[in-house]
Amino acid sequence: MISCTEFIPAYSELFKYLEGKQGKSALIDFWDYLSDIFLTNLKDDVLKNGIKGCWIYWGKTLEEEAADFTMELDEGAGEFSITMHRCPSKGRLLEYKHLEPYRDYCEHCDVLYRRILEPLGYTYILDRSQTDEAQCHLSIKSNNPNKDDILPEQTESKHR
Amino acid sequence: MTKQKITRKASDNQYLHKDFHIAFNYSLDYLRKNMGEGAVKEYLAQFTLTYFAPLKQSILTNGLLALKEHYEKIYKIENAEYRMQFSETELIIHLLASPAVMHIKNNGHPVSPLFRESVSTVNKVICQDTAYESEVLAYHEENGAYRLRFFKR
């Protein structure tokens, strides 16, 4: 059995395998697939709670991943951010002496989450300039913060 | 409208994100659907040769004890229920239910038909170029339980 604590190297090696076999487009296709089929909980949280759904989603996952981070939410402004002081995934990959991480491992974060959030009306900005030190900054902003408190569920019920 | 801010250190929490089992399952299933069964086995072999290189090295030095200690550690992390029979020439592991398979199923996701390769292919490749071999004696799709045997060639 592969433990969930061994997933990150398995994931990084899969990126290498897919790109090596079928090129970068195959890797992007895989990330799109994984976003659609696996990140349904993020989508559900945001549909139900607006920008606060990001707080709920990442609050759970980052604690389970034992990340070193600061997370901020301003519901009135429709803004959410994560300052990742030490990413548990990239940090682990950098610590392994016997394997080389996929050359742009953190790109998957840009593809997977952007694909969920932009269609829901959010601007997704991920600063990956310091990922060599397992650090990044994520900013998510509602494109219409005044309406962000009118949740899709409420909007739906008004139309009934 | 509230403003909230939290800061967490790595030491505040235990590293155990079980949803990674779901992502791994979908990774295998993506390969199966798009590139076939051979690609699943080839990828798992490539991953195993790279990631488990230190374990393979430890088997060369310490024999089956290295495998026993590896799986004891993994099962403890995952809070798995298991039995082991161990001697210098044989190690039999009986995993009563796979925490990976159970987490995937309990969260409503279908388990890939090739998920068992994460047991059979991975352990076969771990044993390559060592004095040992592995064989899956039994595998139960419904809960991922298995009986796995390592033995001297």
Image (cartoon, grey):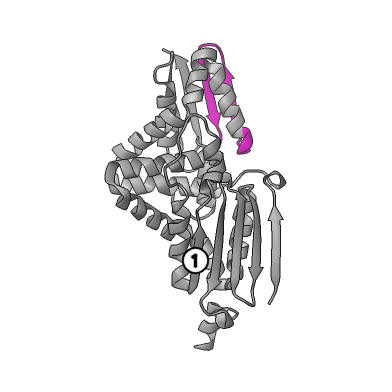
Q: Residue at x 56, y 13 (%)?
A: B87
| Residue beneath disc 1 | A124
Frontmost residue, B90 versus B137: B90
Frontmost residue, B1 versus A151: B1
For the question of whether residue B44 can be seen, the reply is yes
Q: Which percent across, then down, holds residue B14? A: 67, 43
For the image, the number of numbered tags is 1
Quadrant (top left/top right/bottom left/bottom right) for the C terminus of chain B: top left
Residue B47 sits in quarter: top left
Q: Residue at x 46, y 58 (%)?
A: A110
> Which portion, as a residue range, is magenta?
B76-99
Q: Which percent across, then down, holds residue A143? A: 51, 77
Q: Which percent across, then down, holds residue A60? A: 63, 56
Q: Chain of mark 1?
A: A
* Vertical arrangement, residue A28 with respect to residue B150, above or below: below
The question of residue B17 being in magenta is answered with: no
Quadrant (top left/top right/bottom left/bottom right) for the N terminus of chain B: bottom right
Q: Residue furthest bottom?
A: A159
* Vertical arrangement, residue A153 with respect to residue A8, above or below: below
Q: Residue at x 39, y 17 (%)?
A: B129
* Vertical arrangement, residue A132 with respect to residue B126, above or below: below
Q: Which percent across, then down, holds residue B60? A: 48, 14
Circle 1: residue type: Tyr
